Amino acid sequence: MPDRWLQVQLEVPRDAIAEAEALLETLGALVSWTESASDEEILEPAPGAAPLWAEVRITALFPADAARVDIAAAIEAGLGTPAGNPAFSVVEDRDWDADWRRQLKPLRFGQRLWICPVGQPCPATDGISVILEPGLAFGTGTHPTTAMCLSWLDRTPLGGKRVLDYGCGSGILAIAALALGAGRCTGVDIDPQALLASRDNALRNACSERLALCMPAACPTEGYSVIVANILSGPLVQLAPTLRRYAAPATRIALSGILAEQSADVVAAFRPWVQLELTAQQDDWVLLTGCVAD
């Protein structure tokens, strides 16, 4: 195994990702990965949308003796600028996965709930922990919208209740609800990868028998005691009539993925069947909650 690598970084628009990755592989890249080229966050996408950043930074590793001039010339010829101005550096070999995992720490939400990365124990002896394998599916607890939903679940009476997590991503909200005492949960997502991640995380937390996972068309329409949806304001407005079918009298609702200036639109869309109120805000993000009338 080489002890050093030539690292190449370039920025491309999202519609050029596949072309750039194919070019890097052709040039001899042994591995590559993508991340946001800015502070832009990815939330749950609208149905059918791809969760990609507008501008993407691609990092690739080449053998340390790879010819920088040739790589730069090929990138400029194949992709043009600004991708044609790649940044080169030499990095020492290390256990990349272990380095990444060491940066992850258990996080507390509310009074009792902890989200703990795999391999890290809950810091509180009396805490309720969810063990999570961070992956590609959205939802690790670090984003304000997920954090507000988790804190809301922590303070909501869930004992024995049926919970619907619409747009479940990694399954973090559904699994947290089960850890907090919910009887059964249903997780719904449009992305098969998200359902697989949710299933893996449920197995890891020994709650898979109480968690049903499905695409929207297969979601049972029986009434749920609690509905949580951490998506985006646009999809939430469109989903208001759909989510109504899953609600019953006294159902508690929590919605996030909503910017403060978008909250009025979401409140108006749900007003025909539930009165939503702003319950929490972190940065520019808000949590809207309500209870269906008896």
Image (cartoon, helix red, strand yellow):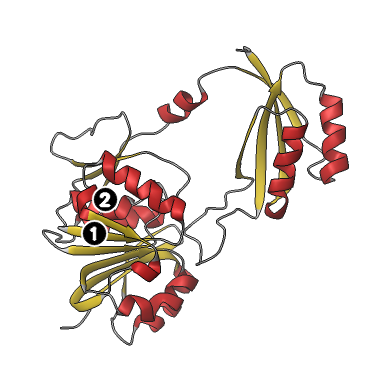
Q: Earlier in the sequence, mark 1 or mark 2?
A: 2
What type is the residue that disc 2 sits on? Ile
- Where is residue 95 drawn, in percent x and y? 50, 20
- The answer to whether residue 110 shows anywhere in this view is no
Q: Quadrant of the C terminus?
A: bottom left
| Residue bearing the label numbered 1 | 185
Q: Is residue 41 left or right of residue 8?
A: left
Of the numbered discs in the image, which one, if any, rests on residue 175? 2
The extreme front residue here reads 218
Tell me whether the residue at label 1 lies in contact with that at label 2, contact meaning CB atoms closer than 8 angstroms.
Answer: yes
Circle 2 — which element?
A: helix
Image position of 84 (left or right of 294): right
Task: Please rate how many residues cluster around mark 2, counting C-alpha atoms within 10 Å: few if below 14, some from 14 to 19, many from 20.
Answer: many
Residue 293 placement, left or right of 142: left
Percent across and percent down for residue 230 are: 38, 62
Question: Which image quarter is the N terminus in?
Answer: top right
> Which residue is pictured at 25% across the width and 54% down the height?
211
Vertical relation: 119 (above or below) 249: above
Can the viewer see residue 13? yes
Residue 275 position by quadrant: bottom left
Q: Nearer the viewer, residue 267 or 69?
A: 69
